Structure formats: C-alpha cells, structure tokens
C-alpha cells in the first residue's frame, strides 16, 4: 500500500532524507522511529505529497502522492491536531467529511460511526475546545478517518494523553489493522511501538539504519540480557547470554535475597543504533 524507494530530499547543504526505502503492506502497522531531526517529518511530508523528493519514488495505493485519486486513500492524523476548537465533535467530522464529498444520510451515518469508534458519542455536541487532551487526540483520529481511507499516517497519536485515552487509542489502532488498513505510526514511546507495531524502521541523520520486526531487531541489536542479583550489601548486575546459569550460581551462593532478569527491549535497540547523546 505504501512504497518508499531510494528517496532523497535536501534543503541547501542539509541532506534531510538520504536514500530511505521501506514498504507497508495492508493490515500492517509500521513504526517509523528516530530522534529529533532524524528525517521522519520530512519523510512523512513527502508521503503526504506536501514535499516532492529530489530523487527516488513514493507510491501510495499504487499512485503518486500528488495524484488526487491516490491521496484519497490516505488519512492523516498529525501531531499538531487538525481539530477546530470552536466546532463540536460532530461539526468537525461533518466539515472534514464534506471536503471529501460526503453529504446527507451518508455523512450523518459516517459521523455516527466515527463518534462511536472513538467513544465520543455522548460528547458529540460539545465544542472541541472543552475537550481534554485525550479526547482531542481521539477526535483527531476520527477526523483522519472520515473518508474511510485504506492508509493511515498517525504522527505521535498519543502525545500528552492520559493512560485511559492512550489505551483506547491502542485498541483503535489494533482494530484498524484488523480491518486491513496500512498504518505508518511515529512515536517517541518505545514501549508503545513494541506493543503496536508489526515492523519498525529506525531512521537517523536522514538514513534508514534498520528495519524489521521488534523481535528481530532486539535479537540483532539489543545485546545481552542482564541478571540483577540482590544482596544485603547491594545489587550486582551481570550481562550474560545464559541467564539461567548465572541465577543458579547466585542462588547457590546462599547470600542472594532475590534475582531478576532484565531483557533488552526496543528502547535498547533504539539507543544502540542512534546513540545516547541528547537531541534538542
């Protein structure tokens, strides 16, 4: 559904995107991960047709991002929310639906479906400006869905929301995947990407460093597990590829009060690939 092949974009002397390639299939959530300034936003802008690549090819639903028919297959929930505070939730959905040519009973039905989908039916007549951050994020997703797109681009969809709204958004993404939609998901929350994404791509300095399933990347770049041994004098941390042997030895020593195994995660992979220096 989405194909990005050898895409390059420069701004003067800055090579913001440097030969990035990846694909997203129907029914797949692809996590696009990277530090600030890595090239994610520029890549997303090119997929949306807002920027033209200097070289390389991007196709969405088999067409160019500049082709109106292909762009109709794409729904975007931006990080800077596309919600009008002075309008109610229903009015927001009616506005976006009208832009896509929906009207009459079809538009009313679609608004009802989406309000129910994001659990806002009981607040449909409230102005969005009175919503909490989590409610606005859910409405933002609903607005991206008005035209029933095959492809969704979700940019930091849970930024600044409470745990209940975050869980509701997780469930919504799972349902959208199950419906066969292709989803690009950007986030700075590594546990979120590990929970939701079928595959992830780590981008930095404009280049795609690695793509694959979370399990594959952890195995390849996560490093060894750590066994943490708790003793009266303090904790001892042992990195090992054979944690059971370390645990047996620690328990046989007689002074261990507890042990736990800390396995590498997607966050470990991300830091190992992109480094630990601050990106402000």
Image: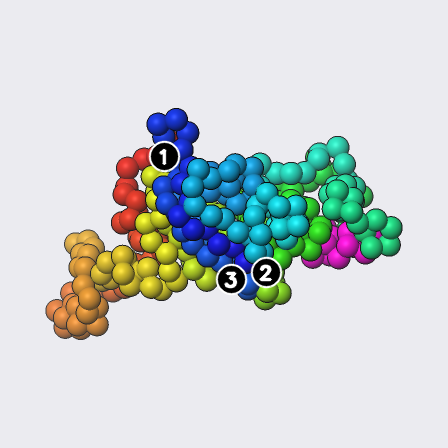
259 left or right of 140 in image: left
In front here: 69 or 33? 69
The residue drawn where x is 47% and y is 48% is 57
> How far across and how far down the image is residue 257, in percent?
23, 64
Residue on which the image places disc 2: 181
CA–CA distance in space, label 2 to label 1: 31 Å
Dot 3 alpha-carbon crowd within 10 angstroms: few under 14, some 14 to 19, many 20 or more = some
CA–CA distance in space, label 2 to label 3: 8 Å
Tell me which secondary structure the magenta stretch mostly adopts.
helix
Badge 3 vs badge 1, beta-carbon distance below 8 Å: no
> How far across and how far down the image is residue 120, in percent?
72, 50
> How far across and how far down the image is residue 60, in percent?
56, 52
Dot 2 alpha-carbon crowd within 10 angstroms: few under 14, some 14 to 19, many 20 or more = many
Span highlighted in magenta in the image: 108-120
The residue drawn where x is 52% and y is 45% is 47
**Residue 240: mark in rendering:** none
Residue on which the image places disc 1: 15
183 left or right of 136 in image: left
The residue drawn where x is 74% and y is 46% is 100
> How far across and how far down the image is residue 17, in percent?
39, 40
Residue 119 falls within the magenta-colored stretch:
yes
First reached walking from the N terminus: tag 2 or tag 3: 3
Which of the two discs, 2 and 3, sits closer to the camera? 3
First reached walking from the N terminus: tag 2 or tag 1: 1
Badge 2 vs badge 1, beta-carbon distance below 8 Å: no
The residue drawn where x is 23% and y is 58% is 223
Residue on which the image places disc 3: 25
12 left or right of 59 in image: left
CA–CA distance in space, label 3 to label 1: 28 Å
């Amino acid at each position: 559904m989405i194909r990005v092949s050898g895409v390059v974009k420069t701004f003067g002397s800055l090579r913001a995107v440097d030969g990035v390639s990846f694909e997203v299939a129907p029914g797949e959530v692809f996590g696009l991960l990277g530090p600030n300034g890595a090239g994610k936003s520029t890549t997303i802008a090119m997929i949306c047709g807002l920027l033209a690549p200097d070289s390389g090819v991007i196709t969405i639903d088999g067409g160019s991002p500049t082709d109106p028919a292909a762009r109709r297959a794409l729904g975007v929930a931006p990080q800077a929310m596309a919600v009008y505070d002075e309008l109610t939730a229903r009015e927001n959905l009616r506005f976006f639906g009208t832009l896509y040519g929906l009207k009459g009973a079809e538009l009313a039905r679609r608004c009802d479906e989406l309000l129910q989908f994001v659990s806002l039916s009981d607040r449909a007549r409230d102005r969005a400006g009175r919503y909490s951050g989590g409610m606005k994020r859910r409405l933002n997703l609903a607005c991206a869905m008005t035209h029933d797109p095959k492809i969704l681009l979700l940019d930091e969809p849970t930024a600044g929301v409470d745990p209940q709204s975050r869980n509701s958004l997780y469930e919504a993404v799972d349902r959208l995947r199950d419906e066969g939609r292709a989803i690009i998901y950007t986030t700075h929350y590594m546990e979120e990407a590990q929970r939701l994404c079928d595959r992830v791509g780590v981008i930095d300095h404009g280049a795609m460093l690695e793509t694959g399933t979370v399990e594959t990347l952890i195995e390849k770049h996560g490093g060894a597990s750590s066994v943490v041994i708790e003793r009266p004098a303090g904790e001892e941390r042992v990195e090992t590829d054979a944690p059971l042997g370390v645990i047996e030895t620690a328990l046989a020593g007689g002074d261990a009060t507890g042990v736990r195994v800390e396995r590498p995660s997607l966050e470990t992979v991300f830091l190992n690939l992109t480094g630990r220096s601050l990106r402000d």
